[in-house]
Amino acid sequence: MNEGKYVVPAATFAEKPDEYEFRFTLPGIGKDETELHMEGRTLTLKTASKFQNPAGFKEVAVEFERPNYAMSADLPELADPSTLTAKMENGILSVVVKKRPESQPRKIAIG
């Protein structure tokens, strides 16, 4: 991916009874421009925008940039990194990781 200036994306983190969900806002970025890596318990996100102005288009003024995004986050201790899944839809990257089975509440049968 393109090296250079990066911006931290807006992100939310949710804990559910059996999983964790990270959501990253990546406006104008497609899944083919996004890299997601796992090393140990650290999740790393990097993007590289491939946007180019159409041929013959000349910018007169620019009021916003098309940034590249990057950030890293450590997964919670109860997360099972082997269950990580990711989905990109409408500029929102959703990353879901299940909790380890032994961390789930369970009913104990009394004999």
Image (spheres, helix red, strand yellow):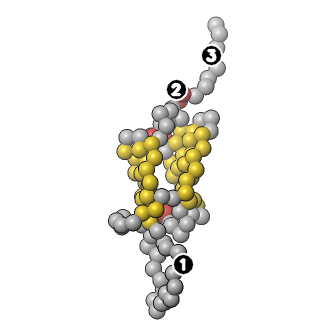
Decide which of 111, 60 is in the foreground and name it.
60
Q: How many marks?
A: 3
Specify the quadrant of the image occupied by residue 109: top right
User: Which labelled disc corresponds to residue 49?
Assistant: none
CA separation, marks 1 and 3? Answer: 61 Å
Relative to 15, is 86 above or below?
below
Task: Rate crowding at label 2 as few (under 14), some (14 to 19) or many (20 or more) other CA atoms within 10 Å.
Answer: few
Residue at (54% x, 78% y) in the render: 63
Asked if residue 47 shows in the view, the reply is no
Residue to which mark 3 is pinned: 108
Q: Amino acid at mark 3?
A: Ile
The amino acid sitting under disc 1 is Glu
Give the class, few, some or many, for how many residues have Cα within 10 Å of label 1's Cα (few <14, many ≥20).
few
- Report x, y in % for residue 7: 46, 62
The secondary element bearing badge 1 is classed as loop
**Residue 21 horizontal/vertical position (percent):** 57, 46
Q: Which residue is mark 1?
A: 63
Residue at x 47% of width, y 41% of height: 75
Instruction: Tell which circle, 1 or 2, labels the residue nearer the N-terminal end.
Output: 1
- The answer to whether residue 65 is above or below residue 55 is above
Tell me if label 1 and label 2 are in contact, CB under 8 Å: no
Q: Is residue 64 above or below residue 6?
A: below
Can residue 27 be seen here? The reply is yes
Say what amino acid the circle numbered 2 marks. Answer: Glu
Q: Mark 2 — residue?
A: 102
